[in-house]
Image (cartoon, helix red, strand yellow):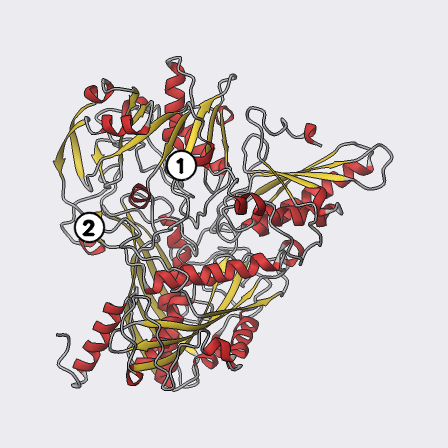
Amino acid sequence: MRGAMGAPPGSPGAAIELEMPDQASGGLGASPPRADGPAKVAGTAGYPADRIPADALWAFVVFTDQPHARLTHLDLGAAERSPGVVAVLGAADVPCNEYGLTKFDQPVFVGLSHSGASSVPCDVSRWEADHLALVIAENLTQARAAASLIEAEWEPLGVVADLDAALAADAPLVHGYEGIGSNLYESMRTRKGDLETGWAAAAVTVEATYEVPYQEHAFLQPEAGTSWIDADGTVNVEIAGQWVHEDREQIAHALALRKERIRVRYPAIGGAFGGREDMSLQIILALGAYRLAERGIERTVAMQWSREESIVGHHKRHRGRIWARWGADRNGKITAVQAEAWLDAGAYNYTSNKVMGNLHLGLGGPYELANAAIDTHVVYTNATPGGAFRGFGAPQAAFAVECQVNKLAEALGMDPIDIRRINTLREGSPSIAHTPMPAGVTMPEVIEACAHAAALPASPSDADPDGDSDADGAELFSPFGSLPARPSSLRRGRGFACAFKNVGFSLGFPERCEATIVLHGEPGDDTPSGAELAHAGADVGQGAHTAFLQMAAEATGVDPASVVGRFSDTGTSGDSGSASASRMTWMAGNSILGAAEEAEKAWREGDRPAIGHFRFIPPPTTELDPETGEGTPNFTYGYVAQHVELTVDIDTGHIRIDRVITANDVGRAINPRFVVGQIEGAVAQAHGHVLSEHLRAKDGRLLNPRFSTYLIPGIGDIPVTTQSVVLELADPLGPFGARGMAEMGVIPYAPAVAAALAEATGVWMDSFPLTPERVWAALSDAQAAAGNLPGRR
């Protein structure tokens, strides 16, 4: 079976293969063992850091450590002469010293000179983790020692630390070239209906400003990779990422090479969540191997970041600010929505302009709105860049939107679910972009499913899973080993929120996904005995490759145990697009169906093996009109609702999440176990963002880039009970009816928790994380304002 699609495993440049365990059975809707499960459980799976050859050279990238400064002097000589050093590379060594996923605005290296092929001035460090040089040595200790010998002198520039500094009238420009005259560099605008009419019809209005924080991706595997040059001159890069073909494009652009001279592949990937969508080590690894080969040094170049280097060196979930004013009539019908939002892009764009698009569309929420005025902006600062992160702007929007809807319900004395029943988008509803929603809107059904589950009583095991409550309900729930809470200080509350999000690339981006299927059998056979699938889609831990194999088996009729997959390799597969935007299963499934059909045609014509290749292109989307916001931004959506129950200790501010119900419409559960795993993982990730993960920054520098002070939740910190309500209401365009769902669970969690806290205490918190000290301070301030307490001591 292996001859038709590439070299056999183990040969130079061979693709990495996966196949189902021999006992795997069941088609779609079954949950066979993961194809990559045995190796991961046994510890034999090859992650990039595991695949570094013993004779590899080690590279170390030197950060500028300058949030905003101009380089005036650079001397690499002492580093070049240091023991064990093979090469020291910088800006002058990069043929085209620029990169960026959606905008070329970042130099590969900061330096005093660079190629004229780049339009990005490279003599200014705009971020503490800008790259100054790459030191390549016999081992990492020697590379680090040499890096300390680099002499750099800097002219300090004014640090634009945050949104307030960036938007000030006298703010220094982070990017002051090519006519960029402001740190606010892109905006979007929506105008729908008549806002004044909407305000006149409102019986109540609510207004607030919401602050949303950073979040670190905290994937298990820090950045690592290798690069080498083949005998035919191909530059190979093996790393963990989310889109092998885009990585290849970025490398080819910076090295000024034809993309055919670059091969990128991913072995096992230890999580991503959007954190691997942009460049980290890809370009500099390729540059190192390429320049060494020019000098006759044909050795693999390897890199691996420490956890601190990883946290400092890659982008985060965007922090930002959202002002919103909403109005509703006495029956709960939303009559007017006005909002303005600002995203802190940090020093470089990364995907900020695209995240802004999702945020902008999300600021109308999953509701029918007749009158709306929404403005959204993205702003350069000298802070850590914001970029792709699970939800991609939707969690920030949902926090503001769903808090506003819950506050409207409170002001009207309405049930928060009832107000959503009145206003929710339905099949055929006009979207915030003026045009009808794509077919398959299931927000009403999702709301009802979540509401029904929430109305059911929790089981005794849910209410007291460990049996550690005393007769008065004083739970021992502090993860910090504090004294038991006083029963009189415990307050309980419930919150509800819902959301939707695009599945697939949006706003006019040319979406596509390719697959190749080869059917095997003997001449004259009526049915194939085996199949091979080549697909570039990345499995970042979610089980995508197993789902691909399941879909390929279903599409071809081949037993799942007889399907072999080769994945995530530009050398064996066409472009799949990114493992992001909740698109991978949806897009891959459609491409696999097309490839199976083409292979079956070849089979019927007598080809053995029978090869089918297909490039799936979904319905087109469009950019929004710059004045009105009218357009067709997305071709399908996913829908989610959440109910949260919590207990808060008002003496300390500690919160325990007792119960979470998450209702997701997944269209068709390709692998139900994976679906539930994605839902529970999303809730746990959102839980950390909302309750404990507080990434602090000052003057353009991260203050706590380590897990000892940036607290991701452990097994004892996550919600006591997470209940997944899985709906399978077919997406009309989805493969086998499936729709993307992996991001949905993170989106409504923050507003649901905020609503539960407000019900428990009467205090709305319009920013998070809801750490104990911040909750306690807000409660103390509220009591002081009410005249009950003197305030914080």
Quarter assignment of residue 556: top right
Dot 2 lies on which element?
loop
Crowd class of label 1 (few under 14; some 14 to 19; many from 20; radius 10 Å): many
The numbered disc on residue 698 is none
Left of 441 or right of it: where is 774?
A: left
Judge by depth and name the residue closer to the eye, 182 or 647.
647
Q: Amino acid at mark 2?
A: Ala
Q: Position of residue 122 (x, y in %)?
A: 25, 31
Relative height, residue 738 to residue 1 (above, below) = below
Amino acid, disc 1:
Ala
Q: Looking at the picture, tell me which residue is in the foreground, 675 or 361.
A: 675
Note whether residue 341 is visible.
yes
Quarter of the figure with residue 665: bottom right
Q: Residue furthest top?
A: 296
Rounded to the nearest angstrom, the CA distance separating label 2 from label 1 is: 29 Å
Task: Identify residue for label 2.
Answer: 161
Name the quarter where the C terminus is drawn. Answer: bottom left
Query: Label 1: which residue?
Result: 224
